[in-house]
Image (cartoon, helix red, strand yellow):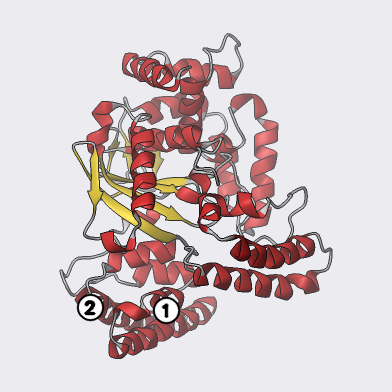
Amino acid sequence: MNKKLILASLSFMLIASGGCALKSNTAELMLTCKPALEASVSRHSSGQEEYEMPSLKEYLGIDYSKLESSDIEELGKIYSSIKELSVSPYEDDSEEMARLWQDFDKELESLGIAVPFQSYGQYLNSIKHKISSEDFNKLQKLSENLEILSEEIEELSDNNIVKQIQEKEDEIWECSNKLGMILSKNGINPDEVNYQIENRSALLALFDVENSKIKLSDASLKGADEISKEDMELYKGLWADSKNLIPDDYLDKISKFEINTDGFENVMAHVTPENTDASSWRLAIDIRDALDADKKHTEEFNNTVLHEFAHIMTLNKDQMMPLRNEYSLNYTVEEGTLKKESYLNQFYNKFWLDIIDEHSEIESLDITEDERYEKNTDFYEKHKDRFVSDYAATNPAEDIAETYRCFITQPKPSGDSVKDKKILFMYQFEELVNYRNDIRKDLGL
C-alpha cells in the first residue's frame, strides 16, 4: 500500500469543526491535463532521455519577473549545476541531484516564491508564523505520527496482517481528527490543506464562483492580505480567459476556481467534482504553466482549458449516474455509470468496443508505472489512426476530452480515419456545434 494513498485517503477524514467527511470523490475523480496534453517529464527529473531542461526563465515562468538580478544570478548557479548533472549517465549522482533541487527550492522559498509542498511537515513550516508555538509543536508531532503510522501500515500490508492494519488505520483516523481540529481552530481549512499536499502543489488562491464571477473564498489558504494586487489581477485575468472557453450554460456548474503551482510542466490544469453527484466542479489552473515570464499565455493554455472543460461536460450529473453499476450495459467509470444517451457512452460504444479488452488487460497488469507507460505507448502506436493524440489513448474519458479539443480548434476533417470520425461524431450534436462556433469566434479562428 502506497504511503501517499494511505495519507490521502485517511488523513482529515473527520473534521471536528463540522464533523463532516472529506469528499472521497475529490481524490478519485481527479482529471488532469499536462501542458503538452501528454505525460511530461517530472519536475525533479534526474535527466530523462531526449529531454532538454528549460532555461531558468522558462522554468520559473511568471515568477521570474518578481526577482532581482542578484536573485536570478544566485538561482542560476544552482540551476546550472542541476542542468549539468541532468545529463550525467551515473546513477550515483541521484543523491546529489536531489540535494541540488532541495537547495534550489529553499532559495526560492527564501525569495517568497511558492514551492509545491511534498509533506505535511513542509506545509506546517510555511504557516509557523501564523500560529502559536504550542499549536505548531502539536501539529508537527501529529504529522510525524501520521508518517510513522503510514509506514507501519505499508509494512503490515506487505505481510497481509489485516487485523493490525485496521488498528493502525484507527490510529490514523484519530490522529488526523486531532490535526484537523487544531488547523480549524486557527482558521485554516483542513480539506484544502489535505487537497494541496495530496496533489503535491502550492495553493496560491481559491475563489468561489457565483454568477460567473469570482471572489476570494473563505477556504482559501491565503487571505486577501497575503495576495499582492498584481497577482490578484493575474488571477482574475486567468478566470476571464478560462471563462471565454466555457459555454455560458456550463458556468453555473463551476463553483470553485483555484490558482496553484506544482512546478514547471507537471499538471497545467485539473478539474474535480465538489460534491458526490458531480453537479458542482472545481477548475484549477497552474499559473506557472499557464503564463510565461512575460505574463503571456503559454502555447497550450487554451487547449488545456478546453480539454478540462470537456471532462465537466461529459462527467457531470446530467451525463452520469453517481452509483457505479458494473452490470450495466452503459460505459462505467470508477465514479459512476454513464447514462445511455450521454456523450461519453455513445462515444465509447461507437469507438472503443473492439479494443477495450486489450486496453483493460494492460490496466490490470501488476507492473511498474514505467512498464505500464511502455505498454500504453505500444497500445497507442498500434492504434495510432484511432486517436487524435497519444494522451487520448489513456482511456475513453481522456479520448473524448482530447477529441473535443480538436473539434473546437481544428477545421472539420474530410478524411475517413477513426480519429477523423471521432471528431465528426461531435458534429451530430447541435449544442456542441454552437459551442464550437462561439468559442472559435472568441478565439479569432
Q: Is residue 120 left or right of residue 251?
A: right
Q: Total marks drawn? A: 2
Question: Badge 1 is on which residue?
Answer: 125
How far across and down, in percent of the image, does residue 358 sit? 60, 39
Few, some or many residues within 10 Å of mark 2 (<14, 14–19, 20+): many
Answer with mark 2 or mark 1, whichever residue precedes in sequence. 1
Q: Is residue 445 left or right of residue 316?
A: right
Q: Which residue is at a point 46% across and 60% down the rendered structure image?
A: 201
How far across and down, in percent of the image, does residue 265 sit? 57, 50
- Can residue 169 be spotted in the picture? no
Few, some or many residues within 10 Å of mark 1 (<14, 14–19, 20+): few
How far across and down, in percent of the image, does residue 127 sit? 36, 75
* Disc number placed over residue 57 in the picture, else none: none
Give SS at disc 1: helix
Please name whichever residue, 227 or 73, is drawn nearer the observer in this view of the structure. 73
Question: Badge 2 is on which residue?
Answer: 181
C-alpha separation, residue under disc 2 versus residue under disc 1: 18 Å
